[in-house]
Amino acid sequence: MNWILLIEQILNGVQLGLLLFLLAAGLTLVFGIMDLVNLAHGSLYMIGAFIAATLTQLTGSFIVAAILTLPATMLVGMAVEMIALRTLYDRDHLDQVLATFGLILFADDFVQLAWGPAGMDIRLPDFLRTSFEILPGVTYPSYRLAIIVVGLSVAAGLYFLVAKTRIGMLIRAGASNREMIGALGVNIRLLFTLIFGLGAAMAGLAGLMAGPILTVQIGMGNEILILAFVVIVIGGIGSIRGAFVAALIVGLIDTVGRAFLPELLGLFLGQTTADTAAPSISSMMSYLLMAIILAFRPEGLFPPRSG
């Protein structure tokens, strides 16, 4: 029956990868186009989850809450960009790191003040709490399958936006030479605000989709942000295609590794030692992959000019 476990873990890896992509895509747009190192991007993921949890309680509908969470998180992101981040564009990366780290602390304290120190749960509708038979004898949770469908749909929509529309043309031009598009009459500040708002909305979407699986709690965006940075470094800073491919790779490595490494290590070590070491080794493999790619392709798998 190991093949059933393998299929399930591959799907879990794809699901984790798509959540990472939603977070990393916005981060790579901001980093690659605006040249802004935003450590507070994970805070938008957290705020999106808390907004979704609150709206689910108020409306009694997860679907309505999800629809309302996206513009709400986008507005929060645009406000943060205009109030706190706009002055950092001409500063060096160290100033950006320090300022956005301060925003993480501010966001955690703000969430604790607004929602309290306790976590929140997001209740799913009945049709998303069932299982779906994907193959004869193989069932998979409907909600996790919905995450995969939504993630793939958003990835396709983002590709169309960036590659086929006028706004996407401006985004790609901004990634190549933002001074030039500013000289051509494009309102670069408005473009940056919209890009940051789009990234915030995608982070909020990732947060609201992760909320029903995890507990919505303070600081929930900090750990996943590290993996998002690994994703954009592997894929190539500023590359949407690179973020998508790298997110799937990292998601599969982390999930499949955690499932099968204990059994593999158990062949050489005691089972207790193998069970203890496997999660750490699985997490380390993503960073090892990043180091190998940086050694041979410092610009990532799909740097923006080729992606």
Image (tube, grey):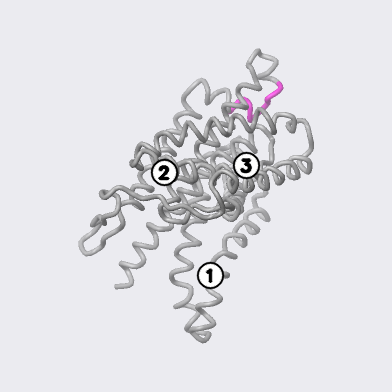
Mark positioned earlier in the residue sequence (3 or 2): 2
* Residue linked to disc 1: 279
Residue drawn at (65%, 19%) of the image = 181
**Under tag 3, what secondary structure?**
loop
The quarter in which the C terminus is drawn is top right
Q: From the viewer's perspective, is residue 306 above or below residue 262?
A: above
Q: Which amino acid lies under the numbered mark 2 shown in the image of this protein?
A: Gly
**Under tag 1, what secondary structure?**
helix
Q: Residue furthest bottom?
A: 270
Mark positioned earlier in the residue sequence (1 or 2): 2
Q: Which amino acid lies under the numbered mark 3 shown in the image of this protein?
A: Ile
The quarter in which the N terminus is drawn is bottom left
The crowding category of the residue bearing disc 2, from other C-alpha atoms within 10 Å (few below 14, some 14 to 19, many at least 20), is: many
> What is the CA distance from the residue labelled 1 to the residue labelled 3?
27 Å
Region of the chain picked out in magenta, as a range: 172-179
Task: Tell whether position 142 is magenta.
Answer: no
> What is the CA distance from the residue labelled 3 to the residue labelled 2?
20 Å
* Res. 151 mark: 2
Residue drawn at (33%, 41%) of the image = 61
Q: From the viewer's perspective, is residue 205 above or below residue 74?
A: below
Q: Which amino acid lies under the numbered mark 1 shown in the image of this protein?
A: Pro
* Residue linked to disc 3: 237
x, y (%) of residue 248?
Answer: 47, 52
